[in-house]
Each structure stands twice: as structure tokens, then as C-alpha cells.
Image (cartoon, rainbow, N blue to C red):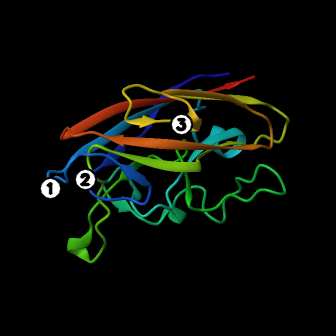
Amino acid sequence: MKLNRRSVLGLIGTVGIGSGAAFGSGAFSSVSATREVEVNVVGADGNGSEIATEFTDVLVDASADEVALRDTDGNLITDPSTLFPTSSDSLTPDDSTTLSTNYVSLIANDVSVVFGYDTSDSGGSDERLMPNSTYDYSSGFFKLVNNDGNGTNFNVDLDTTSGLLTGIGGSTNSYSEDVSAGSVSDLSATLETGDSAKETEDLTITITEV
């Protein structure tokens, strides 16, 4: 299987309040803070679209008020249904599972995931996050999807580094699972906001055939 390393995602946030459960003693700060996670995908074929549309994908739920996406031109996207998979795309692993268009592919889309943003100056909303807080996202925040119709199983490994995005699938900084053909696995996640003006982290997604 051809393995290529490809960065497809950044994770950015600013201070404010979100819809996840938030805890922490840090006082509110008006100073913007950046939470950026660089995602490297290992095992994607070519530009990543083939493995997303034909084999296995990793998706994130962008339905929470404070979760948005940013394209490579810097545009903030608050409607996830405009990105792959849209309602007209085929990413249904079996006849009984339909994936909501609130989910966005981290393999096929060259986007950043934004946790906390403020568009109130242009008639939008203020969805900033609090610093020094914990935001819990329930099962289904990440979906591991095996869309292969030939019975091939894939291992999907998600590995983070510095504790910004934690608790994926109830684990600490690393989660690994064999996803059988035609199945979907739902994972929870936790976001830990610190008090620094800028925090960065790597998230490596490795997909291999098993």
C-alpha cells in the first residue's frame, strides 16, 4: 500500500464559551489565544481523496456552535454541509447507516477546524471559548468510517502530542482501532484550553490495511 504523508488540518480556537461541557478556574481573558493542531495523514493515496471516497475516512462533527472550519483562503465556514461529504456524495458504509452532513472529512477536505470564533462584527455570533477550561465532546465527535465494499479491514490510529486535544475515544493521547468493512466507529474527544496566547499540537492519523 502506498504511504504518503500529508498535512490536511489545523485546529484553531480563541477564548470564549462553547457548547461542550466547560470547566476551569481561569478568569476570562479578552486576549485572543490560538489552538492549532497540525494533522498529518499517513497512508492516504495520492491527494487523499481516493482513500476517503473508496476506503476509509476520519470525520469530525462540526455541528456545535463553537466549531467551524477554515479553508486554505482563510474563509471561515460555519455550514459544514458545503464540504465533503455533501448530501450528494456517497459515503454510506452500509444500507442502515446514513452520515449527517454535519460531518466533515479530515482526509478529503483541506480545511482547518476552528474551536471558538467571533463574527459578531459582521452580523454573526460570538462563539469564543474560555481559557483554562475543559470542553467535552460526546461519542460521535469523531467518526471512523470504513466504506470499502470489498471486505477490507483498516486500522485507524489517532495520535496527539501535547495534551490540547485529548480523550479521543476515552484514551489519553493515542487511540487505535481496527475498523471492519462497512462499519462506523464513534469516538468522543476533549479539548483542553490553556492560558497561553498560542498553543499548538500535532495530530497524526495513520491508516493501514489489516
Q: Are marks 2 and 1 in contact (CB under 8 Å)?
A: yes
Q: Looking at numbered disc 2 in the image, what kind of residue is underneath it?
A: Val
Q: Looking at numbered disc 1 in the image, what kind of residue is underneath it?
A: Ser
Q: Which residue is mark 2?
A: 15
Give the quadrant of the N terminus.
top right
Label 1: element kind: loop
Q: From this viewpoint, is residue 190 visible?
A: yes
Query: Front-most of 56 and 172?
Result: 172
- Identified at 28% across, 67% down, the residue is 126
**Which comes sooner in the sequence, label 2 or label 1?**
2
Q: Looking at numbered disc 3 in the image, what kind of residue is underneath it?
A: Ile
Q: Answer few, some or many: residues within 10 Å of disc 3's Cα (few below 14, many 20 plus, some between 14 and 19).
A: many
Q: Is residue 209 above or below residue 150?
A: above
Residue pushed farthest bottom? 123
Q: Which mark is residue 168?
A: 3
- Identified at 85% across, 37% down, the residue is 150
Q: Which mark is residue 30?
A: 1
Q: Is residue 30 above or below residue 120?
A: above
Q: Is residue 9 left or right of residue 209?
A: left
**Which comes sooner in the sequence, label 1 or label 3?**
1
Residue 151 percent across, percent down from the top left: 85, 35
**Which comes sooner in the sequence, label 3 or label 2?**
2
Give the distance between the C-alpha atoms of the residues marked 1 and 3, in whole angstroms: 29 Å
Residue 39 percent across, percent down from the top left: 44, 34
